[in-house]
Structure formats: C-alpha cells, structure tokens
C-alpha cells in the first residue's frame, strides 16, 4: 500500500496525461485502438501523441483520446484529427510521423498530406 504522499505525487505526475485524454478542446486527436490497431503499433502512436502535445504546451487546446475500430484496418495505426467539423485521417502512423504531424498540423495548421488516407500506397 502506498502512502497518501506517494499517491499524491503519482497523481500530480500523471495529471497532464489524464487531462489530455479526457479534455474537451476543439481540436481532438483520436487514435484507433481496436485489436488490429494495437497489433499494428497504435499504442506507441497514442503515447507519442500524448507526449508531443504535452511537450508542445498544447494540453489546453488539444484533446488526445482513443476509440475502437475506425474501419480501415489495412491502414493501421490510424488517427483522426478533428478541428470543428473538419476531419483529417492519418494512416500507417509511427511515433516519428506523429512528431511531424504535431509540429506541422496541430501547431502549424498545415495538413501533412503524405500521411493522409488519400495518399497511401
């Protein structure tokens, strides 16, 4: 059993990550975490989005969350970026691609076309 002080320290350390996943910001990043996505590497992609958004200081502006099957299993790992009514679907993601997406799209406002669903081989 942990002491109250240890539990409070753990809570404080994890607070940013929980807020990112449960927030209600206008920009949302949703990572497909069904069995096919997890098998294809979605967990490191989700973790990379959480870390990159947090490191960029965007926790108040961007929510990172997960969902079940998005329906395009052959393109996993998949993430959808929602900005109001606009949705961009990124496919065949890696943590390295996530870094670029956060920098160029989430921070810079420019979709990384090369990683979108319409541009895959």
Image: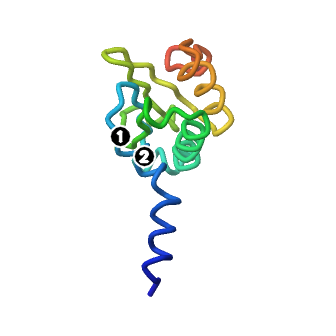
Residue situated in front as seen by the camera: 53 or 65: 53
25 displayed left or right of 53: left
Q: In which quarter of the image is the N terminus?
A: bottom left
Q: Which image quarter: residue 32?
A: top left
Q: Name the residue under label 2.
A: 33
Mark 1 in CB contact with mark 2 (< 8 angstroms)? no
Percent x, y of residue 21: 40, 45
Q: Quadrant of residue 40?
A: top right
Residue at (45%, 46%) from the top-left corner?
36
Is residue 18 rendered to the left or right of residue 112? Answer: left
Q: Where is mark 1, residue-wise?
A: 23
Q: Which element carries disc 1, helix, strand or loop? A: loop
In percent of width and height, residue 102 lies at: 58, 28
For marks 1 and 2, the one nearer the N-term is: 1
What residue sits 44% from the left and 19% below the top?
88
Q: Residues within 10 Å of mark 2 (few under 14, many from 20)?
A: many
Q: Residue at x 56, y 35 (%)?
A: 57
| Observer-nearest of 92 and 102 | 102
Query: Whole-percent x and y of residue 76?
Result: 51, 37
- The quadrant of the rendering that contains the C terminus is top right
Q: Given the current orientation, which residue lies at the most extreme right position?
A: 96
Secondary structure under the numbered disc 2 in the rendered image: loop
Instruction: Report the mark closest to the observer, 1 or 2.
Output: 1
Q: Where is residue 49? Give x, y as percent.
A: 54, 39
- Viewer-side residue, 30 vs 118: 30
Instruction: Tell me how many marks there are.
Output: 2
């Amino acid at each position: 059993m942990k002491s109250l002080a240890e539990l409070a320290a753990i809570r404080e350390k994890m607070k940013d990550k929980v807020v990112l996943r449960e927030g209600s910001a206008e920009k949302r990043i949703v990572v497909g975490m069904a069995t096919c996505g997890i098998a294809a590497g979605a967990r490191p992609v989700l973790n990379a989005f959480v870390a990159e958004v947090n490191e960029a200081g965007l926790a108040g502006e961007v929510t990172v969350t997960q969902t079940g099957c998005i329906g395009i299993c052959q393109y996993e790992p998949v993430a959808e970026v929602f900005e109001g009514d606009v949705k961009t679907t990124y496919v065949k993601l890696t943590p390295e691609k996530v870094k670029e997406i956060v920098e160029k799209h989430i921070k810079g406002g420019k979709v990384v076309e090369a990683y979108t669903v319409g541009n895959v081989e």
